[in-house]
Image (cartoon, rainbow, N blue to C red):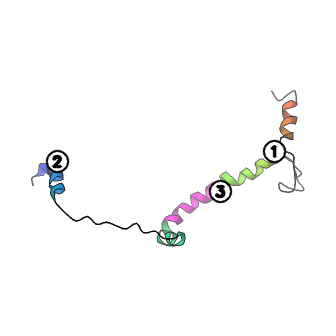
Amino acid sequence: MDSRDTFMGGDSMLQRNQNRNLPIKKYKNKKHGFFKEIRINFWLYLLILPAILFALIFRYLPMVGITIAFQDYNPIKGIFGSKFIGFSNFRYFFRGSQWF
């Protein structure tokens, strides 16, 4: 083998490797449960935990407040205690003369 084989394209090296009849290891696709997967890759899941918490706290939790638009909101009763009125607030807003 000369230096051109490894640095200049390596075509002859590739042909040499294809001509060998080496046994290929076949790995069985082992399936295991959820908790075993967590145990095996614990540190990887721990690394992604801050990103998941960030998304839950700052992206999805504020969406609960959107329900105020569809309620006859009463601050004393709170978001979950106020009466649901649907699109009545939107109808009232768009029927007004100054919304445009």
Q: Which comes sooner in the sequence, label 1 or label 2?
A: 2
Q: Give the distance between the C-alpha atoms of the residues marked 1 and 2, in whole angstroms.
A: 68 Å
Q: What residue does disc 1 label?
A: 69
Estimate how packed mark 1 is, as few (under 14), some (14 to 19) or many (20 or more) residues with alpha carbons within 10 Å.
some
Q: Which comes sooner in the sequence, label 2 or label 3?
A: 2
Magenta region includes residue 47 = yes
Disc 1 residue type (three-letter): Ala
Relative to residue 71, is residue 39 depicted above or below?
Answer: below
Q: Which comes sooner in the sequence, label 3 or label 1?
A: 3
| Front residue of this view, candidates 32 and 40 | 32
User: Quick one: quadrant of the N terminus?
Assistant: bottom left
**Residue positioned 49% across, 69% down in the render:** 37
Q: Measured from the top left, where is residue 98 in percent x and y?
A: 85, 28
Disc 2 residue type (three-letter): Asp
Residues at discs 1 and 2 in contact (Cβ within 8 Å): no
Q: Measured from the top left, where is residue 49 in percent x and y?
A: 57, 62
Tell which tag, 1 or 2, sits nearer the viewer: 2
Q: Give the distance between the C-alpha atoms of the residues marked 2 and 3, in whole angstroms.
A: 52 Å
Badge number at residue 13: none
Magenta residues? 44-55
Q: What residue does disc 3 label?
A: 56
Q: Give the distance between the C-alpha atoms of the residues marked 3 and 1, in whole angstroms.
A: 21 Å
Magenta region includes residue 60 = no
The secondary element bearing badge 1 is classed as helix
**Residue positioned 19% across, 46% down in the render:** 9
Q: What residue does disc 2 label?
A: 11
| Front residue of this view, candidates 71 and 30 | 30
User: Quick one: quadrant of the C terminus?
Assistant: top right
Tell which tag, 2 or 3, sits nearer the viewer: 2
**Residue positioned 59% across, 58% down in the render:** 52
70 sits left or right of 31 in the view: right
**Residue lying farthest left?**
2
